[in-house]
Amino acid sequence: MTTHDSAVDAPSRGPVAPSWGFRVPGAGRVSHLAPGMEYQGTTVQLCGMYPFVAGSGSPMLGVPIGRHMLWGEVLCLDPLAWLNAGLVTNPGMFLLGQPGVGKSSLAKRLITGLVGYGTQALVLGDTKPDYTRLVSHLGGQVIRVGRGLDRINPLDSGPLGRALARMSGPDADRLRLEIRGRRLSLLLALCTLVRAGRVTNPEEVILGRTVDVLTARLDREPTVPDVLGLLEEGPDELRAAARAGSAAEYQRRVAELIPTLALLCEGSLKGVFDAETTTPIDLDAPAVSVDISHVAAAGDQLVAAAMLCTWAYSFGVVDAAAVLAEQGLAPRRQFFGVMDELWRALRGAPGLVDHADALTRLNRQRGMASLMITHSLDDLEALPTEEDRAKARGFFERAAIKVMAALPGRELDRISQITRLSAPEREMVSSWAAPEALFAGSVHPGRGKYLIKTGERPGLPVALTLVGDEWDLYDTDMAVRGTDVRSVARAGGQR
């Protein structure tokens, strides 16, 4: 084997120029090197230009919600798109975070993007209200529930009733029973709430028969005053259901049920649920917000009742859309339901979790994604009974997409019992929980930052930055601050 001297074989290269060029005229000397233009794209788009790329695993399906905090790439989120792509097993989302760190900003970004993709957004009970301005801006429908404002009839079948009128045969019979079950279920929930205790089995039988008699007698939707009036009348059908042989015995059987229903019509709830629905939900609206902020100051009982009725009515709308699509009477629709301040509806009375649980379990079959928002799992632990607490924890456990904003270490200990968090993930989320220094104009370190967890996969840390009209539409502190949100330092200025 023959060796050669590289100095002899290689051509003469001459002196090597310094990084900024030679200091002589015409040698390309520059005093400053500008960074090259950076382009971003998917591996499908750029593989021909540069085949040595590897993604970090952030899905590019759905609404762009921010940039990955480690890799800088855009991260997108859409529960229904992720479900269709096999990334998750159900379209349920659960968002936890301290007040003021941007929970509603994430929800509003998702609403804005999903409406643009053709998904109808439903804000199921806006208690502050945080979403009214955004829904109005999107050309949606705002229903304001309260005394002297819009009313919701708990027994209103809504679009399900209109769908039933266009159907016949076995499908119509099944839908008729479904409407009957929904009316009775919500009526029981409201009685439970007003009574602060469960309705007995005999009372449930009597209420069921009452709903049946009113449905057969009336050519309109029955109302709570109709139920109360029929119970007080005590016709033969109700006496038979009560197993009462005389009028006096019947009165004893309904002695507690009548005052309970009277409270819905004459007590603190008067003027909200005691008449026909004034403003039905528009199925063609791109977004709908049911604003219950006018009843929020009346106490948890009224708020819980308003949220339960709103949830039941809204889920009835979603089911009606599915029925109409299955019958070929309307196009298939997709929905995104936002259930903010979840704890306020659940702590009203024992047993209310059952009704919320029944409403939310079938979202996958409905073509509906849901987002539940609360501050802490402690909100669920504050429910009246252990049975309620266990079922409420199931909301978080079943959600395929869990989003954590700024949370303290104690809260992360609870979450770790349900979904695994690595040590770096815990350190990252807890570092967002409190400002490092307290001075005027400082920005909370966790504002607009979220960790998205799906199953046992590593979490996706994302930072959301507001753009354009979002600064005004997503602002939830305007009433407190009294200034335009644009006057606040925009670095991390999410709400």
Image (cartoon, rainbow, N blue to C red):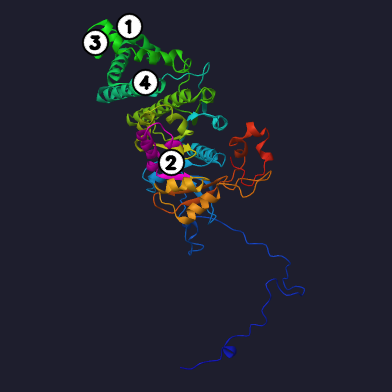
**Mark 3 is on which residue type?**
Ala
Residue 392 visible? The answer is: yes
At label 3, counting other C-alpha atoms closer than 10 Å, the crowd grade (few under 14, some 14-19, many 20 or more) is some
Q: Earlier in the sequence, mark 4 or mark 2?
A: 2
Q: Which residues are magenta?
A: 379-403
Q: Earlier in the sequence, mark 1 or mark 2?
A: 2
Disc 1, disc 2: CB below 8 Å? Answer: no
Pick the front one: 55 or 398: 398
Q: Principal SS element in the magenta part?
A: helix
Pick the front one: 418 or 162: 418
Residue that badge 2 annotates: 93
Q: Position of residue 231 (x, y in %)?
A: 33, 10
Which disc number belongs to residue 120? none
Which disc number belongs to residue 244? 3
Residue that badge 1 annotates: 233
Q: Secondary structure at mark 4?
A: helix
Q: Earlier in the sequence, mark 4 or mark 1?
A: 4
Q: Nearer the viewer, mark 2 or mark 3?
A: 3
What residue is shown at x 69% (from left), y 39% (from top)? 487
Could you say which quadrant of the image residue 216 lies in?
top left
**Mark 4 is on which residue type?**
Leu
Residue that badge 4 annotates: 187
